Amino acid sequence: MSDVLSVVVDGIWRQGDRNLAVRLVTENGAALPGWQPGAHIDVHLPCGLIRQYSLTGDAARAESYLICVAQEGASRGGSRYIHETLRPGQKLLISPPRNLFTLHEDEPVILLAAGIGITPLYAMLLRLEAAGRPFALHYFVKHRGSAAFLPELTRPFNHGVCVVHCSAEGQSPRNTLAEILPGPDSWRHLYVCGPVGFMAAVRDAGAAKGWPEERIHSEAFQPVAPPVALGEETFTVTLASSGESWPVPAGQSIARVLQDHGVAVPLSCEMGICGACLTPVIDGTVDHRDTVQSEAEKSASAQQIALCCSRSRSARLVIDL
């Protein structure tokens, strides 16, 4: 695993009543690779799991990385391990940062977060404030005690504003989005991160206000429910570099078929939420099932496919491998 970094857990502390902030540093104190707001890392947990977490805090600080992890009742192991087992001084392996949620920091932006979706948007807010760019952050939580980074977000800002909306106080997204979301005339980009239902509600509200799809940027921190695999057909995947082809049967991913035939596939989440396995498509019609790409990207002339979860609507799919 030559593409991983060895780090040490330098500190763990509470952020609200159900979140833990985790600071990671190198063993020798050397600087970590630089990153930009919106980036995430893979964390290789000692329990054998690999999970993706957005980097948060000040991206200008090269001596450490900061992540924040919610305590999930339906955790598949990652959240549970970090909340119950991870300790300061423990060594971890992580990937270098990857960014599929790039901030357009030279233009006014609206930031909309729900729950632990605040993590990438908090980093964006800090960058925009430092750069003197206009912003507005709306942060939705169940109650004020569940908010992460609350003291930092409720201080005065010189170039923008942050408003915390609490569902327990009658300010749920359902009751508030249509009122607080401005039109696209004065704001160039809209960034949203949170549960899938929240992001869908933001997109619907944005469409009603006239926001073009290409100016709404989102990142999922949890996978959508997988579609029911009814009537899936076997198709053939072909490597453009060698012409080798193999059938991909129903219920098996393209990535697994390729790996079974000795083809190296860069996998991480295996749920279509991290983008590690996105691969250009040369020919064929993709059945997109990832949450990484926008609808505009999924319908563009130049297509990419998430090998871990997406399939082909055509009998033959040629990929750039």
Image (cartoon, rainbow, N blue to C red):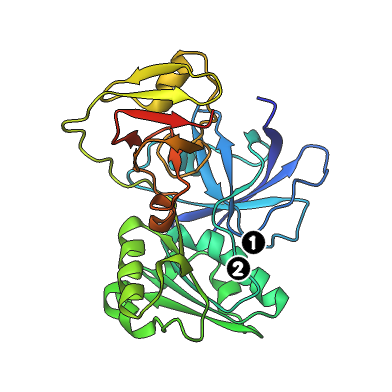
> Sequence-wise, which precedes: disc 2 or disc 1?
1
The residue identified by callout 2 is 104
Residue type pointed to by label 1: Gly
Percent position of residue 51, x then y? 50, 39
**Other residues around mark 2 within 10 Å, as few (<14) / some (14–19) / many (≥20):** some
**What element does badge 2 sit on?**
loop
**Other residues around mark 1 within 10 Å, as few (<14) / some (14–19) / many (≥20):** many
Viewer-nearest residue: 195 or 263: 263
In percent of the image, x 34 and y 39: which residue is there?
285
Does 96 sit above or below residue 123?
above
Marks counted in the figure total 2
* Circle number at residue 57: 1
Percent position of residue 13, x then y? 59, 54
In percent of the image, x 44 and y 23: which residue is there?
238
Residue 199 shown left or right of residue 87 in the figure: left
Residues at discs 2 and 1 in contact (Cβ within 8 Å): no
Residue type pointed to by label 2: His
In the rendered image, the residue lying farthest to the left is 231
